[in-house]
Image: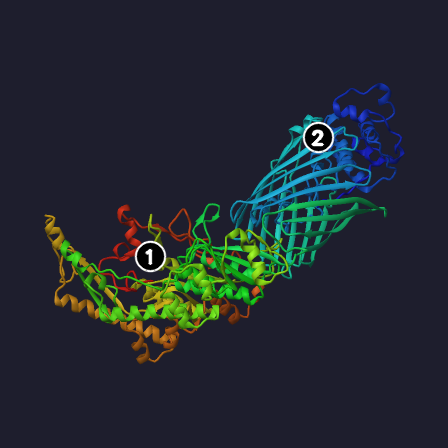
């Protein structure tokens, strides 16, 4: 939106000639003629034209007449500008033509501008210069609170804070005067870097002068608190070479002092550019802004200093109020010693586009009030925002990705994919989105673990509970896909597919015989009997204990799946079990049994939905869901909850990523530094530790356990268990304030083992000789070239027993269990989340969102003013990278240390093995491990 503000010319402009006249009004409107235009174009003045008045005054008044204007009223602004021109002429070597041009600039400013340029409204450069008059201002001149397409013109320091791409077209219409058009764009390249562009065209009513203003800018944000930006402006005009050659470099800054208050600064003419022989001094603008009441109220105050024609500076303010969804009212004004400017209007948001209308005027120091004109604006953006009108019976399509990592990898341009947390958040947002009545979930082949799968079911159930109709369209009829789809109101299958809910299976692989054939002797010691992780290398077949716990685990998942399907489809569980044993089946058979609602092609789905659900009309299903986003982020003090992810095996040192396979491993140093940061940060109210790990190094797990216990003394630490949180994964969870597990989480496995591979026989078979020299009886205890004696095995067993007892003690202390109860469940056995709840190992069944809500409720936080940080973030440039917002104004140690990252050096041929057998590469020989059986899964 643009303000149309008109400043009348008057006889006081005689002082712009550099002559020291006191009776400026005597010349009034009697000075007429083509002198000004010819002076601008370099034409010599005739003697008759020059007679009686200074030539620069003649030029000014003739410029006025050339545009057919008559202004008998003298204003203080014009007089002050004239004084400034006079001083500049006396103190600088300025040619007559340059002085004339500076005078004409003010005339241009008065005639051409639809208001003070945007930069002027925010404290623009010397308003007496024609180049600074070329710019269409926004009707809400705000240095601090407008991180949108107008940022390039208002304050380039806001460009790095722009959240969504936006394009604005602005037009100023003035009462019988000149008009202007501007195009503004802002593009966020990453979450911390943005670009801006603006071009503005203005033509005088006589079409004698045409000029263009181009602006290019870039902005960088640091920790969402500090924004730095640079802007380069250059001008074009076929009528004036001086304008055509002019350019300027400007700097912008925004700094969030406290969550609700932002300081901004813009320095124009930083490069002190030259115009018509004069070097322009920099101009400083400072502002304070605040966004409160969840974004409903925005305030911006600013002050401009260095405006040559206003020595005492200019103060201005803007107020924006959200009157309803998609309706914003605004009012702005400015005050200086010469005049007051005011305006107001409204902006209507229709989702991906918006329209604005404003009216503007001014009150002069002498008391007269003038109406300046109207402003119009049209903006477009790719992301849907809160809107004025929302039609009924709106449906939207949401594609469930085949899999989602707990933390999505990032590229230089943002996330490379959807993380599991983002998927849950999308469903949660959709449940609360009033724009839609129905959702079509497109579900293909799914690779989620069953714990994650049931978290998704719960999220879909939330959407239904919010009153929306949810329809599943299956492109794949497998067990996982149908288990998720069955929670919807209706389930449809593509005609070319069969329903294949065939049940569950898992497989165990044993390498003992093959290793013996190669001359490799695996040597392991374990505690307790159900700790079956080493069995893959020690045995040729599963032990009774391993078979027992695996069968119990499979049965637990199977019963959960059958029960969920039966409940969602309102069927008897025995019928569902029987149907599974006859799978696969054609869609017609499945429909007859009540498992499906039909078989339909995707382009016929909307019609089928209307028929089956009895809708009055066929719903128009939008192809992609775009969550609503506010135009500006609220700056009310936001509380933070940090979600810290522990995924993959736990190792000592920094986190790593295995090349090629992409297997992840969580380092103790990485997690401890994050926990320490969260404890020291005043903005972090609590921590959710999201664990999806089979365990790993006993030492690393112990270090993390201690860090969790220390943090839990200061702030709530709530654990959310994903697909697996067993052995060392459970050990680090034990001291948490509260533990949530999904019903099908694999947990428990409280035990420990250690071992090595003796390759002495393999080396002999290959003809490789080897000799060991040692000092100390046990110096070669973990050498791959020696066997363990009974004494050595006893020594290792004693050490492991001590660690195991410490494990049990940590469980007793953290879970407040009786030692006998802890030992009864601490025999190395794995449990589902449901069973773990019965055993007292977890506190509650629930997923990630439940854990976040638990912290929020415990701290008494408002959900609408809550910020959730997901840490660390995966990076394409390093194995593990942390992208933390730094609390610049919190405690002194709030700055997170730079976390070192490393990539595991694995021969490419064997890299793929690391994902299945992480112990081959991630651990030292003989390192004590708390780990789930390798390859444990369904």
| Between discs 2 and 1, the one toward the N terminus | 2
Q: Residues within 10 Å of mark 1 (few under 14, many from 20)?
A: some
Q: Is residue 800 left or right of residue 680?
A: left
Please, what secondary structure does the residue beneath circle 2 have? loop
Q: Residue at x 26, y 67 (%)?
A: 752
Q: Residues within 10 Å of mark 2 (few under 14, many from 20)?
A: few
Foreground residue among 384 and 260: 384
How many labels sit on residues?
2
Foreground residue among 845 and 658: 845
Foreground residue among 539 and 139: 539
Task: Give how far across and how far down residue 631 sits, in percent.
Answer: 62, 53
Q: Is residue 934 left or right of residue 560?
A: left
**Residue that badge 1 annotates:** 653
Q: Residue at x 51, y 68 (%)?
A: 853
Q: Is residue 740 depicted above or below 33 in this figure?
A: below
Q: Is residue 129 depicted above or below 717 in this figure?
A: above
Q: Is residue 910 left or right of residue 856?
A: left
Please, what secondary structure does the residue beneath circle 1 have? loop
**Residue that badge 2 annotates:** 92
Query: How far apart, in angstroms, are the residues tagged by discs 2 and 1?
Result: 67 Å
Q: Look at the image and name its color scheme.
A: rainbow
Task: Give how far across and how far down residue 670 sits, in percent.
Answer: 38, 57
Q: Is residue 752 in view? A: yes
Foreground residue among 454 and 101: 454
Task: Give how far across and how far down residue 730 sits, in percent.
Answer: 35, 68
């Amino acid at each position: 939106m643009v303000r149309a503000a008109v400043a009348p010319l008057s006889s006081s402009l005689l002082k712009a000639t550099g002559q020291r006249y006191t009776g400026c009004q005597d010349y009034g409107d009697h000075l007429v003629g083509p002198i000004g235009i010819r002076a601008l174009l370099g034409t010599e003045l005739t003697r008759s034209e020059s007679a009686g008045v200074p030539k620069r005054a003649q030029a000014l008044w003739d410029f006025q007449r050339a545009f057919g204007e008559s202004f008998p009223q003298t204003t203080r602004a014009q007089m002050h500008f004239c004084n400034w021109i006079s001083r500049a002429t006396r103190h600088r070597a300025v040619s007559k033509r340059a002085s004339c041009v500076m005078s004409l600039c003010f005339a241009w400013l008065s005639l051409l501008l639809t208001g003070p340029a945007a930069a002027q409204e925010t404290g623009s450069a010397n308003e007496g210069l024609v180049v600074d008059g070329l710019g269409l201002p926004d009707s809400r001149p705000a240095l601090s609170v407008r991180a949108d397409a107008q940022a390039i013109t208002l304050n380039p320091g806001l460009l790095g804070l722009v959240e969504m791409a936006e394009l604005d077209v602005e037009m100023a219409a003035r009462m019988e005067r000149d008009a202007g058009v501007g195009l503004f764009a802002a593009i966020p390249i990453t979450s911390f870097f943005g670009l801006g562009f603006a071009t503005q065209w203005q033509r005088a009513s006589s079409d004698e002068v045409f000029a263009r203003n181009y602006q290019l800018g870039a902005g960088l944000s640091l920790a969402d608190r500090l924004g730095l930006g640079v802007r380069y402006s250059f001008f074009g005009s076929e009528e004036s070479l001086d304008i055509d050659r002019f350019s300027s470099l400007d700097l912008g800054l925004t700094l969030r002092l406290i969550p609700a208050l932002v300081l901004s600064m813009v320095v124009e003419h930083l490069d002190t550019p030259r115009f018509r022989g004069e070097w322009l001094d920099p101009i400083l603008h400072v502002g304070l802004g605040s966004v409160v009441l969840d974004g409903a109220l925005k305030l911006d105050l600013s002050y401009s200093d260095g405006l040559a024609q206003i020595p005492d500076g200019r103060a201005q303010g803007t107020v924006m109020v959200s009157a309803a969804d998609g309706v914003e009212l605004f009012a702005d004004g400015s005050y200086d010693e010469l005049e007051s400017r005011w305006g107001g209007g409204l902006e209507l948001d229709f989702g991906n586009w918006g329209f604005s209308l404003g009216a503007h005027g001014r009150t002069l120091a002498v008391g007269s009030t003038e109406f300046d004109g109207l402003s119009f604006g049209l903006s477009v953006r790719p992301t849907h925002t809160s809107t004025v009108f929302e039609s009924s019976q709106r449906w939207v399509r949401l594609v469930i990705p085949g899999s989602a990592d707990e933390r999505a990898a990032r590229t230089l341009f943002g996330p490379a994919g959807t993380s599991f947390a983002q998927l849950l958040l999308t469903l949660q947002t959709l449940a609360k989105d009033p724009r839609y009545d129905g959702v079509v979930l497109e579900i293909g082949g799914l690779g989620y673990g069953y714990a994650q799968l049931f978290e998704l079911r719960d999220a879909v159930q939330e959407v239904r509970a919010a009153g929306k109709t949810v329809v599943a369209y299956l492109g794949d009829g497998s067990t996982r896909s149908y288990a998720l789809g069955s929670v919807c109101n209706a389930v449809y299958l593509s005609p070319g597919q069969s329903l294949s809910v065939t049940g569950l299976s898992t497989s165990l692989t044993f390498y003992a015989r093959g290793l013996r054939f190669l001359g490799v002797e695996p040597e392991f010691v374990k505690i307790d009997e159900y700790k079956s992780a080493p069995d893959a290398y020690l045995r040729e077949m599963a032990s009774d204990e391993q078979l027992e716990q695996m069968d119990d685990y499979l049965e637990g998942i199977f019963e959960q799946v059958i029960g969920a399907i039966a409940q969602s489809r309102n069927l008897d569980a025995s019928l569902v079990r029987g149907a599974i044993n006859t799978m696969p089946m054609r869609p017609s058979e499945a429909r007859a049994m009540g498992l499906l609602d039909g078989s339909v092609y995707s382009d016929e789905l909307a019609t089928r939905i209307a028929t089956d659900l009895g809708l009055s009309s066929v719903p128009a299903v939008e192809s992609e869901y775009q969550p609503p986003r506010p135009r500006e982020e609220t700056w009310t003090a936001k509380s933070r909850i940090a979600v810290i992810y522990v995924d993959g095996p736990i190792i000592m040192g920094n986190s790593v990523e295995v090349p090629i396979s992409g297997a992840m491993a969580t380092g103790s140093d990485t997690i401890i530094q994050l926990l320490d940061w969260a404890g020291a940060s005043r903005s972090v109210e609590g921590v959710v530790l999201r664990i999806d790990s089979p365990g790993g190094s006993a030492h690393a797990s112990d270090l993390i356990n201690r860090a969790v216990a220390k943090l839990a003394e200061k702030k709530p630490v709530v654990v959310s268990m994903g697909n697996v949180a067993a052995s060392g994964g459970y050990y680090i969870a034990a001291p948490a304030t509260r533990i949530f597990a999904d019903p099908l989480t694999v947990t428990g496995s409280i035990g420990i083992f250690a071992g090595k591979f003796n390759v002495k026989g393999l080396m002999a078979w290959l003809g490789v000789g080897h000799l060991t020299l040692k000092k100390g009886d046990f110096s070669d205890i973990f050498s791959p070239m020696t066997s363990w004696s009974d004494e050595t095995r006893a020594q290792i067993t004693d050490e492991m027993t001590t660690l195991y007892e410490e494990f049990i003690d940590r469980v007793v202390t953290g879970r407040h269990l009786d030692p006998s109860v802890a030992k009864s469940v601490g025999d190395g056995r794995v449990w589902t989340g449901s069973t773990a709840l019965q055993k007292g190992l977890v506190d509650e069944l629930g997923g990630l969102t439940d854990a976040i809500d638990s912290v929020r409720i415990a701290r008494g936080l408002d959900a609408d003013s809550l910020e959730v940080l997901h840490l660390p973030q995966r990076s394409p440039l390093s194995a593990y990278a942390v992208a933390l917002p730094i609390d610049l104004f919190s405690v002194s140690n709030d700055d997170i240390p730079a976390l070192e990252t490393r990539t595991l050096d694995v021969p490419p041929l064997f890299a793929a093995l690391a994902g299945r057998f992480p112990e081959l590469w991630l651990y030292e020989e003989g390192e004590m491990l708390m780990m789930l059986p390798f390859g444990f899964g369904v």
